[in-house]
Amino acid sequence: MGMRIDVHQHLWTEPLIAALSRRRRAPYVRRVAEGWALRVESEPSHLIPDTDDIDHRTRLLADDGTDAAIVAPSLPVGIESLDPDEALPLLEAYEEGTSELPPQWRAWGSLALPVAQPADVDSLLDRGFVGLCLPATAIATPRAVERLWPLLSRLEQRGAPLFVHPGPVVADQGGAEGPRWWPAMTSYVAQMHAAWYAYFEHGRRRFPELRVMFAMLAGGAPLHLERLASRRGTPREPLGDTLFYETSSYGPRALRAMAHWVGTDQLVYGSDRPLASPVPSRFPSKRVEAMRRRNPHRLLAEMASAA
């Protein structure tokens, strides 16, 4: 039946922390008594451990009811949008750290977006990444989606998925002024809304076979389709089976609402560890199994079938 998979975790590996510690401007890390302080533009400082204990994290997979996990880069850090001479050493450090993980772990790949080409997508996939992870800020307008058409086309040709994850917070959104949770509840939600609607209108028809997963239930964007119909003057359209919604940070009420609009078959389990802990869905066991096993198999056939 395939493995039960957590499609969304993060790890702070030793190579990545070392690369960030050498930087003199954000993003960077600095040693503090409790571990490392991560400084990102326009967000409060975050405390991260010395390095994640991979043995402990692997044991947590079973506690969470999963067999394997996929690591994603922390896209709010903003590495992908840096000048290539700054981005590439950090991306190489991310890859070095994920390449050393136990077999229960795989990783989403990332690119230096200012210079990314379709051949870079090929290279990522050939090196073992399960797919491409993009910041929502890079796909959040119709024009932005069109600029990414060459990369999306190559992903579709290769049969690999896209993961859309919240990206950096811009300075005028007040992320650095509010409490630590402020960006997650404001900027991240708005980014995911914009990315979902931009791709819904300007990507899905052009790439009918490309499987796209949106973090955090796309911020609930599909729940507003009635409003879209009233503004656009057209009836609700079928969403199809290539758009997936990762469940991290949401509980039973949001999951039930999303299942009503997009179908349980499009929900894919993700925990967002260590930034969040899993929230029980209170779904029947068959639905839980679908979210952890069958639906990831459709999204990630190569990994999910390697039981």
Image (cartoon, rainbow, N blue to C red):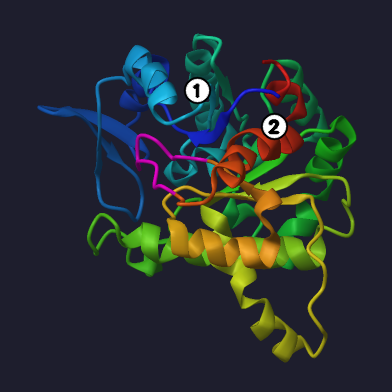
Q: Which quarter of the image is occupied by the N terminus?
A: top right
The answer to whether the residue labelled 1 contacts the one labelled 2, judged by CB atoms less than 8 Å apart, is no
Q: Nearer the viewer, mark 1 or mark 2?
A: 2
The picture places residue 127, in percent across and down from the top left corner, at 70, 15
- Give the Cα distance between marks 1 and 2: 15 Å
Q: Which residues are magenta?
A: 270-280
Q: Secondary structure at mark 1?
A: helix
Label disc, if present, on residue 94 of the rendered structure: 1
Camera sees residue 245 = yes
Residue drawn at x 46%, y 51% is: 281
Residue 209 on the magenta span: no
Badge 2 amino acid: Gly
Residue drawn at x 75%, y 57% is: 145
Q: Left of 200 or right of it: where is 195? A: left
The residue singled out by tag 2 in the image is 131
The picture places residue 230, in percent across and down from the top left corner, at 71, 90
**Looking at the image, is 215 positioned above or below residue 121?**
below
Q: Secondary structure at mark 2?
A: loop
Label disc, if present, on residue 74 of the rendered structure: none
The picture places residue 51, in percent across and down from the top left corner, at 30, 19
Provide the major secondary structure of the magenta segment: loop
The picture places residue 142, in percent across and down from the top left corner, at 74, 66
